[in-house]
Amino acid sequence: MTRVIHTGDTHIGYRQYHSPERRADFLAAFERVIDDAVEMDVDAVVHAGDLFHDRRPDLRDLLGTIRALRRLREADIPFLAVVGNHESTRGGQWLDLFADLNLGERLGADPRRVDDTAFYGLDHVPKSRRADLDYDFAPHEADHAVLVSHGLFTPFAHADWDTETVLDRANVDFDALFLGDNHAPGVETVDGTWVTYCGSTERASAAEEEPRGYNLVTFDDAVDIRRRTIETRPFVFVSVSLAPGEDEARVREQTRQHEVTDAVVVVEVTGEGEPVAPAAIEESLSERGALVARVTDRRERETDATVDVSFADPDDAVAERVRDLGLSSAALEVDDTVRESAIPDSNVRETVEERVSDLLSEGGDAFETAAALDDEGEGAGSDAGEEAEAADSDPDEDPDTGDDTPAEAGEEPEDDSPGEEPDADPTDGTVEADTDTPDGQVTMEDF
């Protein structure tokens, strides 16, 4: 018999709502999972990716994670994991460091046997590279086999990765798939194989109303998957529908019915009542001890007033500045993709990579600047290009704060979960072309 904890999407280091307390909450949630693992003396802790929220975690978050993993090592409980999209880098992974420190193991194509169960790993793979995967795993002699991966798999919501394809093409028969990336827990079967998400260990967005936790999985004669919850920062969700004539007083009345001390309070206003001032309600909740208060008025209001959008409009200002930079057509397409509101945050990186790959294959002058294409050599954009180069001399520095830790300065949107996916993939602004094996075949070791 093998009994393990299946966890993932811990997002350690996420400074949600720009709150240092919320940042500490994500590490605390991971520590509670470790507490349970030690107390129950499980055979392993299996992590399905996004241990960290960012590929460059802050030192305090890194040290806190190391302390937690040391406790597992002292209890002789292996920590087995794959790399998620939030923490993935082009070079070495944090899991490789933990392996060097004897604190964890990065799962891959070779089986890692724990009692009578073999565990394999498949790191997050960009959608554009999945077609070339060979799903070639080394054989095992255990009674059970599990594939651990990170992505949005069918038949769950927001899926873009076909589970049947994985199972059909894999040369190992898996009893279960342990998945991460979707923050909503769930269990399904596909072709006789158990497929399960453990969910996130902390609320990465207001959409994640259900309690957080992990899976406790036992492999014996059958596979037994049980959901366990952990204590996390309280979230108070208040929905107020205003009847005609009702106003802010009604919203305050509804919020007073809830204990908000040290809680994240999320208020949603709907209905046909009078306009409300979110800032005033948020201030009153903070005065009552709420850690964070967010009020959203979901109502759409018609107005006869003519709206005069001036250059002060931020989008117009950005668009005009971009036009002045004299960027190449490829760079302009990347800019449009990054700022396109219709593209989910989680898909921005893959969309950019796919488009750049297409442009590289097409050839042509898509990467030539407007100045380079100007017949006279002094075309529009030449001066602006020099300004852009000077402004970009330190790619890691935030232009507003000077902070050289973009994990915080470039904080992701608060509604950042799959579903509304955190999986906004934080990038360092660099787009690199994919490098496959010489014959064009991508192997498991590439990830």
Image (spheres, rainbow, N blue to C red):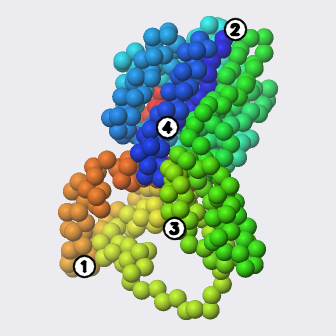
Residue at which label 3 appears = 279
Mark in the foreground, 2 or 3 = 3
Circle 4 crowding by C-alpha within 10 Å: few under 14, some 14–19, many from 20:
many
Q: Earlier in the sequence, mark 1 or mark 4?
A: 4
Q: Residue 328 occupies which quadrant of the picture?
A: bottom left
Point out residue 280 in the picture as x, y percentages from the top left corner: 52, 68
Q: Amino acid at mark 1?
A: Gly
Dots 2, 3 in contact, CB < 8 A:
no
Q: Earlier in the sequence, mark 4 or mark 3?
A: 4
Mark in the foreground, 1 or 4 = 4
Q: Earlier in the sequence, mark 2 or mark 3?
A: 2
Point out residue 255 in the picture as x, y percentages from the top left corner: 64, 59
For numbered disc 3, what is the local secondary structure?
helix
Q: Which mark is residue 26?
A: 4
Note whether 361 is above or below 196 in the view shown: below
For numbered disc 4, what is the local secondary structure?
helix
The residue lying toward the viewer, choosing from 426 and 153, is 426
The residue lying toward the viewer, choosing from 416 and 112, is 416
Q: Amino acid at mark 2?
A: Met
| Residue at point 59%, 11% (across, down) | 41
Q: Which mark is residue 379?
A: 1
Q: Which mark is residue 1?
A: 2
Q: Residue 131 occupies which quadrant of the picture?
A: top right
